[in-house]
Amino acid sequence: MVDWVQTLLGGRPRQRADLAWKTRQSAAQELWLVVVDASASTRRHQALSDAKGLLAQLFEDAYSQRARVAVMTASGLAPQWQVSGSKASGALNDWLQGLGAGGGTPLLEALQEVAHWLGLRRKQFPEEQQRFLLLTDGRLKAWSALPAIDCPGLLIDIERGPIRLGRSRQMAAELKVEYLHIDGVQPV
């Protein structure tokens, strides 16, 4: 794009070489890191189904804001990356449609891997603004210490049912992220 102010300060342009060009300065890239607890306990009381609706909206917002996303699921024997720092796309919706719950809760392993991955990512992209979102019912047997997730974050508690353990609130406090129950999330 031509920088007309700089061009005209140099006098009337007579040829293409006389034009001053604006350098493209992009805003700092944004990364939304999402960890989804898809263990068997999240099947109860439509917890994962409601979380999927929330994720669909989040992915749509990421796409419209041109944010990058990284998505990890914690289910089965080990956490698994679905996307790691790509631009949001329709492929996320396809993945989301097929997301099911089952198996154990390797959430602690997922959080450790995420903390390590964020540290490496921060070195590679120091200007990137990172946000962390954890969707979980907090149904872990026990944990000793949670890794530091060094970016602003939010834990959305998807625990439902008549008997709630309420561990997600404690987990959010230890991770130093905000806490919100999914019932308190306002639809857009």
Image: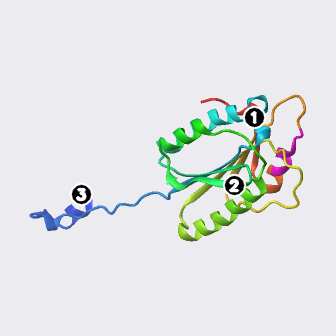
Tell me if residue 176 can be seen: no
- Position of the N terminus, as image quadrant, is bottom left
Given residues 37 and 87, the one toward you in this image is 37
Whether pointer 1 and pointer 2 mark residues with C-beta atoms closer than 8 Å, the reply is no
Q: Is residue 99 left or right of residue 3?
A: right
Amino acid type, label 2: Pro
Task: Give the number of the disc on residue 79.
Answer: 2
Task: Report x, y in % for residue 56.
Answer: 58, 36
Q: CA distance from mark 1 to mark 2?
A: 18 Å
Whether pointer 3 and pointer 2 mark residues with C-beta atoms closer than 8 Å, the reply is no
Tell me if residue 149 can be seen: yes
The residue that mark 3 highlights is: 4
Indicate the quadrant where residue 139 lies: top right
Q: Is residue 168 magenta?
A: yes
Looking at the rendered image, the disc whose residue lies closer to the viewer, 3 or 1, is: 1
Amino acid type, label 3: Trp
The region drawn magenta spans: 165-171
